[in-house]
Amino acid sequence: MSRVLVVNSGSSSLKYQLIELDGERVLASGLVERIGEASLADDSRNPVPDHTAAFQIMLEGLREQGIDLDEPLAAVGHRVVHGGERFVEPTIVTDEVKREIDELAVLAPLHNPPNLAGIVAAEATFPGVPQVAVFDTAFHRTLPPVARTYAIDADLAEQYGIRRFGFHGISFEYISGEAARFLGRPSADLKLIVFHLGNGASVTAVDGGRSVETSMGLTPLEGLMMGTRGGDIDPGAIIHLQREGGLTADAIDELLNHQSGLLGLGGFGDIRDVQKAAAAGDARAALALEVYLHRIRGYLGAYLAQLGRADAIVFTAGVGENNAAVRAAALAGLESFGIRVDTTRNESDSRDARTISTDGSAIDVLVIPTNEELEIARQALALVTGQRAGDSPA
């Protein structure tokens, strides 16, 4: 058995892929939306009350794609965003694991609860099949103390588990391996700066295949500017909003998670809309775009300094893979650092892994499409078969 069903369960959506690891082929995929949302009277789509119902819709979708559901699964692999201190490897789900994922929801309230709902629904749908949780924080287990430690009272930090965890680790782990293969060099020899730019965004410095710096912290709020999250902010601004603005903790949570970033500053959560508005003369949108790029350049410089050098800068995820203007603007004027982008290569509409720097660039600039589903499938199969991730299945 080498078929793994990969599930990415959100609050109102369920994305899935059925992957055959022998040959790493996607056999089927799909998306169930509007989970838990009321159906409008004129809406022809039936409401999906919960994740268990979403799994039944998924099964129908698999049948429609010609999948034999009687053929056994090796595992169901689940993306779980926050694994805290304990979960630093792929983990077989037990009742205790589910309790701890639920407890960690306080640090990832938008993500862990629906991740857990997907696990529970999968257990009911596929009884007896191993459920494997793969954690976004796990790749960052190698962060050294100097990178993961916040400069607050040490006893208080220990009591409440306040430290940098980092996120998007599944993507970073996949990209690190793919970059090494693309460059034809061992991972152990490479120093990479990887930008995962999507609606959520973060950057990681990878040294020898290990995460040594990352922009997200205790929660997915820190770091780069994002679609609806503002990233770095002076904590004093939050205290000021509480004292002077009368905002409650819940109101600030809503502000920082849903009403900030590109949306809060530029009026649109999608960077393509921000770019269009800025081009049309919208001053707010123009400023939002400038701040977005300013943050990227700031982290790039910081991580170049922390690594001492870089072999490659890698862009991935929705914005990183598809937005040539963002890549060009983020790296413009950095020739003195050995970074030179080739305009023609950068503007190519290829969807393959590719170099977008000039032949004379001292630092390679790459675009590599991420594949978190495949990484989850690899890790899940490796766990249940006792292999190392990346080995061929038996």
Image (cartoon, rainbow, N blue to C red):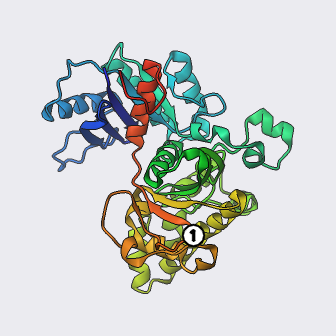
Give the residue at mark 1: 362
Residue 117, visible in the rendered structure: no
The quarter of the image holding the C terminus is top left
Q: Nearer the viewer, residue 85 or 260?
A: 85
Q: Amino acid at mark 1?
A: Ala
**Residue at the (37%, 23%) spot, across then down:** 75
Residue 93, visible in the rendered structure: yes
Give the left or right position of residue 160, taking residue 351 as reference: right
Q: Position of residue 211 (x, y in %)?
A: 62, 46
Q: Is residue 84 above or below residue 189?
A: above
**Residue at the (57%, 81%) spot, across then down:** 333
Q: Secondary structure at mark 1?
A: loop
The local crowd at label 1, few if under 14, some if 14 to 19, many if 20 or more residues have their Cα within 10 Å, is some
**Residue at the (46%, 62%) spot, across then down:** 366
Q: Position of residue 268 (x, y in %)?
A: 43, 68
Q: Nearer the viewer, residue 159 or 252?
A: 159
Give the left or right position of residue 109, taking residue 273 as reference: right
Q: Position of residue 377 (x, y in %)?
A: 39, 32
Q: Nearer the viewer, residue 267 or 241?
A: 267
Q: Position of residue 45 (x, y in %)?
A: 19, 44
